[in-house]
Structures are given as structure tokens and as C-alpha cells.
């Protein structure tokens, strides 16, 4: 298991940005750069701000990186005329972000929109994904509630009228409702969460971007069979931590992961969609236990592989000795003479 760091500089959450193919991608980062990486992907209508209380709880053990998707948070919001707002495009930008940031392997934490983005990353580069934590990040049709009915109507019939009807989901009242619905006490939800989201949604032109993404969410459902094939074939270590009162993604979506990955761990929490607002301590503890086991298992497998490699090398060397004892003796004599010459040159000292 990775030893926790106590370095204050590593525990500090830094706000940074990278240029990714001409786009500024804002991200939050904390933890030792050489620790196992955890890539946090937010959803609608939020940003990396939703992870503000989770990152410090993980940064002693993990290198935590949380980017803002294009059109969200503090990343660039390119004009729709030159940037197509689809989930394929968002996933491509985040994939390129991992390249520019030098993230070669990582566990994924996916929430809401972050799930179809993260699962696309896993399809494209499965060997890079060490584990998946899905917090109300859906991949199964049975996980879609009736709350999706207006959006699905727009998928089937993309008229101006059906598009207009979805603007109700972009109001400050609707944003606050997403945060507090299903929570036992709304005062547990920090008001800056939904207030910041509402302010960013109200930027000129952002409403059209969000309506484009509502329409394109149908592409995620179309990819569900591919996601299922990945879960079944690759069997990534998977933890689903789910607010059971989510008005959009039902607990059945969490349970369904076990259909394709029988070893998936499922935890249902007595809260709503934005479970981190009320249960960050419980979720952080579950992640630490889960990833701790994944890291320990990987370390054992790596040690076993190295041990097998050394055993094979010894076997090959022994075979060479048996096959050509004369040649081996000559090689030993050559190595002995070379070592004596090196000792003469260094005064007989072996520096380490």
C-alpha cells in the first residue's frame, strides 16, 4: 500500500490550467505526482468545484486531478459554430488532456455526464484505466428515471418546441432542486454549490450549449452495449457509490453493474444526486478502502510477475551453462579479468 504523505505542499489543492489543442482546460490538482492517479470527472451542471471537499480527503494517498469539461466551470467555452458540443468531443478533449498532463494510468471517478465521458476513455484506452468509481454515473437503461422523459422526447422529435421545453432545467430553481432533492436536510447542502453552477449556466450562449448536450445524450444510451462489453471483458475493479434518492439515475443503474461485472461493489447512500454534498466523508472512506485493495493487489501481481521473470532468467542462464560449459567458463574468466582491471583503476573500492 502506498504510504500516505504528510508533505503540506502535496496536500495543497492547486488550481491550474493546460492548453489542450488550443483550448484552456482548467483543473484542480493535489497529492504526490508519483502516487496512483485518480481522475475525477464532473457532471451537469457542475464543475470540478463539486470535488472541493473530496480532494483534500484523498490527496495524502493519491494524485488527484479534476478537470472542468469544455463549456463548464472555468475551462474555455468555445463558440458552438467552431466547436461541436457532443459527448464524443468532450471525451476527446479529456483524453488529450490526460496526454498533455502526462497521466499514463489512472482510476476514474465518474459522476453524471462524467460517466459517458469516462467510459469512452476506457473504451479507447482500456489499459490506462486501473479502476472505476461511479457515483451516480449511469450506464444502463434501467437506471434512467422518468425525469428523463422530456429529454427523451427531444431525442425522438428534435423540434424547436421540445428544445424550448428543456430550458426549465437550466433555471436557478431547477439547479438548486437537483442539489437538495432527496436530502434529509437541505441546509446540509452548501449554497455556493448551486449558486456557482447557476451563475456559470447563465453566461451568454451557455444555454444553447447545454441544450445541444441534452440532445446528444442519446449517443450515450446508444453506446451502453459497448460499455457493457467493456465491463464484462475487462472486469475493471468497480465501485458504485449511489445516492438512492437521485431523481434522474435510479439505484437499479448501480445494481446493474453486477450483471456484467459480478465483482462490482455497490454502496447505496441515503441522499440524492449530488451525494458529495452530504456524504463526502463516507464516500472518501469507501474510495480509500476500495483503491487501497486495488493498489495492494496490483503490487502483489507486479511482484509476482517480476519474480517469475527472474526465475525464467535464471532458468535460461542455467540452460546456457549446461549447453556450453566451455564458453561459459571463458566468459567467467573474461568477467574476472575485467573486474580486476576495474579494481586496479579505482583503487579496489566499489562505490554505491
Image (spheres, grey):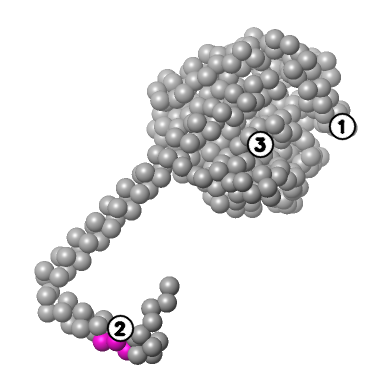
Quadrant housing the C terminus: bottom left
User: Could you tell me residue 189's position as x and y percent?
Assistant: 75, 19
Q: Which mark is residue 274?
A: none
Closer to the observer: label 1 or label 2? 2
Q: Is residue 217 above or below residue 180?
A: below
Residue 193 relative to residue 342: left or right: right
Q: Quadrant of residue 144?
A: top right
User: Could you tell me residue 226's position as x and y percent?
Assistant: 48, 30
Q: Tag 2's secondary structure?
A: helix
Q: Residues within 10 Å of mark 3 (few under 14, many from 20)?
A: many
Q: Quadrant of residue 248?
A: top right
The residue singled out by tag 3 in the image is 55
Q: Which residue is painted at 74% across and 26% down in the image?
A: 45
Q: Which residues are magenta?
A: 337-342
Q: Which residue is painted at 40% across and 23% down in the image?
A: 262
User: Could you tell me residue 79's position as x and y percent?
Assistant: 81, 40
Q: CA distance from mark 3 to mark 1?
A: 27 Å
Q: Which mark is residue 339?
A: 2
Precedes in sequence: disc 3 or disc 2 = 3
Q: Is residue 1 above or below residue 196?
A: below
User: Could you tell me residue 113's position as x and y percent?
Assistant: 65, 28
Q: Is residue 340 magenta?
A: yes
- State the residue in front, 114 or 351: 351
Precedes in sequence: disc 1 or disc 2 = 1
Residue 196 relative to residue 13: left or right: right
Closer to the observer: label 3 or label 2? 2
Q: Which residue is painted at 45% across and 37% down in the image?
A: 294
Residue furthest to the right: 204
Q: Tag 3's secondary structure?
A: helix
Could you tell me if the residues under marks 1 and 2 are in contact, i.e. CB atoms within 8 Å?
no
Amino acid at each position: 500500500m502506498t504510504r500516505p504523505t504528510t508533505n503540506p505542499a502535496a496536500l495543497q489543492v492547486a488550481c491550474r490550467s493546460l492548453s489542450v489543442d488550443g483550448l484552456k482546460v482548467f483543473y484542480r490538482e493535489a497529492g504526490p505526482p508519483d502516487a496512483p492517479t485518480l481522475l475525477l470527472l464532473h457532471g451537469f451542471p457542475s464543475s470540478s468545484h463539486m470535488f472541493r471537499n473530496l480532494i483534500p480527503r484523498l490527496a495524502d494517498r493519491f494524485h488527484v486531478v479534476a478537470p472542468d469539461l469544455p463549456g463548464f466551470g472555468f475551462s474555455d467555452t468555445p463558440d458552438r459554430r467552431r466547436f461541436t458540443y457532443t459527448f464524443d468531443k468532450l471525451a476527446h478533449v479529456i483524453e488529450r488532456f490526460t496526454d498533455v498532463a502526462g497521466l499514463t494510468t489512472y482510476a476514474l471517478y465518474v459522476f453524471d455526464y462524467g460517466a459517458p465521458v469516462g467510459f469512452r476513455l476506457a473504451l479507447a484506452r482500456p489499459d490506462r484505466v486501473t479502476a472505476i468509481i461511479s457515483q451516480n454515473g449511469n450506464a444502463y437503461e434501467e437506471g434512467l428515471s422518468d425525469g428523463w422523459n422530456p429529454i427523451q422526447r427531444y431525442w425522438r422529435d428534435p423540434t424547436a418546441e421540445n428544445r424550448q421545453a428543456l430550458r426549465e432545467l437550466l433555471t436557478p430553481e431547477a439547479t438548486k432542486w437537483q442539489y437538495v432533492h432527496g436530502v434529509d436536510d437541505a441546509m446540509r447542502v452548501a449554497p455556493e454549490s448551486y449558486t456557482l453552477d447557476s451563475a456559470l449556466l447563465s453566461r451568454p450562449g451557455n444555454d444553447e450549449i447545454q441544450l445541444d448536450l441534452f440532445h446528444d445524450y442519446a449517443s450515450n444510451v446508444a453506446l451502453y452495449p459497448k460499455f457493457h462489453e467493456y465491463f464484462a471483458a475487462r472486469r475493471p475493479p468497480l465501485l458504485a457509490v449511489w445516492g438512492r434518492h437521485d431523481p434522474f439515475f435510479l439505484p437499479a443503474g448501480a445494481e446493474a453493474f453486477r450483471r456484467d461485472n459480478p465483482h462490482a461493489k455497490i454502496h447505496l447512500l441515503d441522499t440524492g444526486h449530488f451525494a458529495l454534498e452530504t456524504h463526502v466523508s463516507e464516500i472518501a472512506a469507501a474510495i480509500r478502502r476500495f483503491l487501497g485493495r486495488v493498489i495492494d493487489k496490483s503490487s502483489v501481481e507486479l511482484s509476482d510477475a517480476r519474480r517469475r521473470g527472474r526465475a525464467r532468467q535464471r532458468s535460461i542462464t542455467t540452460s546456457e551453462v549446461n549447453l556450453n560449459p566451455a564458453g561459459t567458463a571463458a566468459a567467467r574468466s573474461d568477467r574476472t579479468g575485467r573486474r580486476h582491471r576495474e579494481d586496479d583503476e579505482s583503487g579496489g573500492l566499489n562505490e554505491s
